[in-house]
Image (tube, helix red, strand yellow):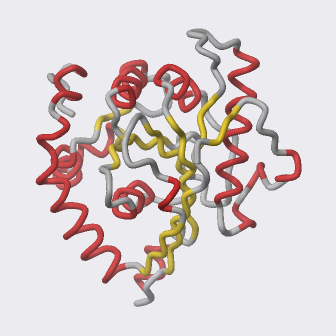
Amino acid sequence: MSVATTIEEYVANQPAYRRKRNFIRNILIRGLGFKVLWRVTVTGLEHVPESGPTILMMNHISLIDPILCMGAITHRYVVPMAKVELAKNPIMKMLIDAWGAYYVNRGEVDRQALVNSIELAKSGTLILIAPEGTRHPEGLSRPKEGLTYVATKSDAVIVPAAISGAADWKQKLFRLQRPHIHVNFGRAFRFKTEGRRRIPRDEMNMMTEEAMYQLALAVVDKSKRGVYSDIENATTNLIEFVD
């Protein structure tokens, strides 16, 4: 998304990215990545809705996590956020802009990125959010507030996207080994907002915790569930499953 582009223009222009997205996903990611660089197993695709406002809630263990999600789903396009630092690399900037991703400033509350996420989701786009904000290869950590805010404002369906086996992909490639990576999608759900436009902060925090436990349940490698390893404490009081 260009800095000079308004969110209204960006949302309206989503169909224009189709040809470039097809090339990047089918040739570069699935062709080169999935068939040459990595061995990728994808499960739970049936949980990803065919259409409508949707958020992929992704754990973040490596640089290639968004790429894996973009390649794993073929019936829709995944639109991720990209940290602004990546735009300093000409090749990365070219690929990000060709796909039509949008930028986010890390380390601060980027209100424009939140607005972009909400409007994209409302328009029926499948967006990608890593609730932890930064990479945590050791396992799930405490999340930021952005996911719940975007989901409640857009009434989007949330699909957990759990990646395992990607943390050491570069090291394995250097040893001429193809890393075995698993992308697993968990049950789709949405938050119970009951039509309210404003949700109390304590309730928002509870929603976030319940969502993180759903992400933990989707992590195939149980040792990587991190601070949400105590699955027995998971509750579903503020979420409702939609599949």
Closest to the observer, 206 or 107: 206
Taking 180 as reference, is 1 above or below it?
Answer: above
In-image side of 99 versus 189 (left or right) = left
Position of the N terminus, as image quadrant, is: top left
Residue 2, image x, y percentages: 17, 31
Is residue 101 or residue 77 the one in the foreground? 77
Please report the residue visible at 37 percent of the width from the left and 59 percent of the height from the top: 73
Q: Residue 72 location in percent, x, y?
A: 39, 64
> Seen in the image, is 27 located left or right of residue 116?
left
The correct choice, above or below, for 106 with respect to 130 in the image is above
In the figure, 30 relative to 197: above or below?
Answer: below
Residue at 68% in and 48% down = 214
Q: Position of residue 197 (x, y in %)?
A: 56, 10
Please determine whether, in this image, residue 4 is positioned above or below residue 100. above
Q: Residue at x 31, y 73 (%)?
A: 33
* Residue 69 position by quadrant: bottom left
- The location of residue 106, given as percent across then percent down, is 45, 34
What is the residue that sits farthest to the bottom in this orientation? 176
* Relative side of 179 to 19, left or right: right
